[in-house]
Image (cartoon, coloured by chain):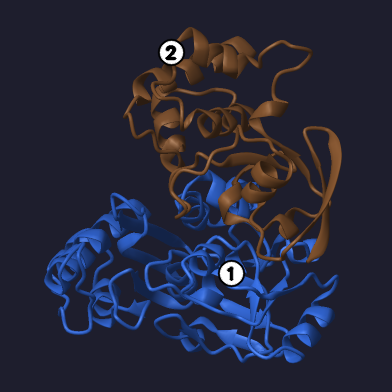
């Protein structure tokens, strides 16, 4: 790991100031992606601003027809929350399948979506559930938030505060995990709710998470596994790597979408 | 350098370390508690699992500074008054180890697992060991030991 200056702000305001006062800072939340990245010397931030100890960013509120989850909430807390299980069991299950138990004790919702790893799970949930991302500056719709591989709409000195997930009528997430890393080779989040129908695909796209509009259209007409089973996804723009070709991932999207609709009921 | 203080196995400790010092390095090199192992360096193997404020975490994937003020338990902190923890006993009884390298992490993960899920079955144990790798592939007896300890502690 390269050297860096370490800051442990006591408030979100202090964190914003620390970001503004540094050359090339990085926010540290749970660190389950950032620390491994630093260890491999794949990043060299001048400063780390550790917001992991800001416990007032850790909460889950069920209010009205939505869940609002603080950005610092750990995956394990989302997975174990009775409120999440009641209103959005697909989200609880998704959180329960990120990484492994030790990772889930550290990793946070805000950290996951700010990093926007193309194989991360939470971006699929945000896009698939029409989530609203509240930051220190504004509200960003999930559709506007994820702008490319490891890229988001966040500005340099902007911090995610909380994410609102409207309750779905039906939802499910199916992931085909890489057998070694457990990251999604393909993950498909399907939902039906006040926003209509959404199918969000993670793990497959070169630009990160995306919506499969042809599948959404098919499900609009007929909400059933068979409706997506016949939708072929083009391999254009999908990842090819040592784990699988773009064609293989395209095929997996259809398979996972079918299973997700089945699971959503 | 900056001073990082925490409680490790019930003892207050404090040391002046570089910000980039990992918790596992702090535990092993600064405190000399070498029961916690470093296996993979890529956050996958779980040999370095310790408890921070009662939760199992990978100490190679956390800065010592992030544990400032926390209560840390390592494998050395499990035995009480010379008596092995039930999970340690079960690993001995059921031969839950071959070379022993992954054992500290396996045991710390198991203690956390039994605390979170008192009613364990084999499938759950195997699923929950996802973040702990045994290069000897000796999972069978590890799973047996965890199930036995979970029964014992019920």
Q: Which chain is blue?
A: A
Please tell me the numbered disc located at residue A111: 1
In the figure, residue B142 lies in which quadrant?
top left
Residue A67 higher or lower than A21, as above or below: above
Q: Is residue B34 left or right of residue B3?
A: left
Residue A172 or residue A96, whichever sits in front? A96
Judged by depth in the image, the label closer to the viewer, 2 or 1, is 2
Q: Is residue B60 left or right of residue A240?
A: right
Residue A12 higher or lower than B111, as above or below: below
Q: Is residue B13 left or right of residue B78?
A: right
Q: Badge 2 is on which residue?
A: B95
The answer to whether residue B154 of the structure is visible from this angle is no
Residue A118 higher or lower than B106, as above or below: below
Residue B137 location in percent, x, y?
31, 29
Q: Residues within 10 Å of mark 1 (few under 14, many from 20)?
A: many
Q: Residues within 10 Å of mark 2 (few under 14, many from 20)?
A: some
* Chain containing mark 1: A
Residue B136 location in percent, x, y?
33, 29
- Under circle 1, the secondary element is helix
Q: Which chain is brown?
A: B
* Chain containing mark 2: B
């Amino acid at each position: 790991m390269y050297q860096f200056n370490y800051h442990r702000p006591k408030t979100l305001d202090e964190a914003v100031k620390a970001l503004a006062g540094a050359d090339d800072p990085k926010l540290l939340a749970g660190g389950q992606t950032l620390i491994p990245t630093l260890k491999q010397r794949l990043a060299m931030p001048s400063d780390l601003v550790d917001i992991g100890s800001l416990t007032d960013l850790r909460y889950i509120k069920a209010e009205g027809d939505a869940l609002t989850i603080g950005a610092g909430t750990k995956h394990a807390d989302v997975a174990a929350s009775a409120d999440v299980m009641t209103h959005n069991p697909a989200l609880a299950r998704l959180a329960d399948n990120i990484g492994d138990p030790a990772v889930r004790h550290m990793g946070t919702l805000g950290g996951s979506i700010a990093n926007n790893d193309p194989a991360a799970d939470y971006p699929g949930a945000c896009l698939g559930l029409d989530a609203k991302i509240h930051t220190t500056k504004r509200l960003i719709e999930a559709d506007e938030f994820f702008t490319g591989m490891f890229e988001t709409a966040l500005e340099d000195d902007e911090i995610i505060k909380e994410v609102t997930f409207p309750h779905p009528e039906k939802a499910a997430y199916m992931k085909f995990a890489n057998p070694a890393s457990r990251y999604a080779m393909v993950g498909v989040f399907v939902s039906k709710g006040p926003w209509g129908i959404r199918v969000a695909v993670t793990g497959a796209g070169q630009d990160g998470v995306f919506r499969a509009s042809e599948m959404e259209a098919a499900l609009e007409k007929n909400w059933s596994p068979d409706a997506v089973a016949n939708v072929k996804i083009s391999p254009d723009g999908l990842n090819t790597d040592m784990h699988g070709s773009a064609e293989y991932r395209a095929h997996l999207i259809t398979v996972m979408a079918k299973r997700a609709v089945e699971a959503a009921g | 350098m900056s001073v990082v203080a925490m409680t490790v196995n019930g003892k207050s400790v404090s040391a002046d370390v570089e910000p980039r010092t990992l918790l596992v390095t702090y535990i092993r090199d600064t405190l000399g508690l070498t029961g916690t192992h470093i296996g993979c360096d890529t956050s996958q193997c779980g040999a370095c699992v310790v408890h921070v404020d009662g939760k199992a975490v990978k100490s190679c994937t956390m800065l010592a500074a992030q544990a400032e003020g926390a209560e840390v338990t390592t494998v050395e902190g499990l035995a009480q008054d010379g008596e092995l923890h039930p999970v340690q006993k079960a690993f001995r009884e059921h031969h839950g180890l071959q070379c022993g390298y992954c054992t500290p992490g396996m045991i710390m993960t198991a203690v956390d697992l039994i605390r979170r899920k008192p009613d364990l079955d084999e499938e759950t144990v195997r699923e929950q060991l996802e973040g702990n790798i045994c290069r000897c592939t000796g999972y069978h007896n590890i799973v047996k030991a965890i199930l036995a300890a979970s029964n014992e502690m019920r």
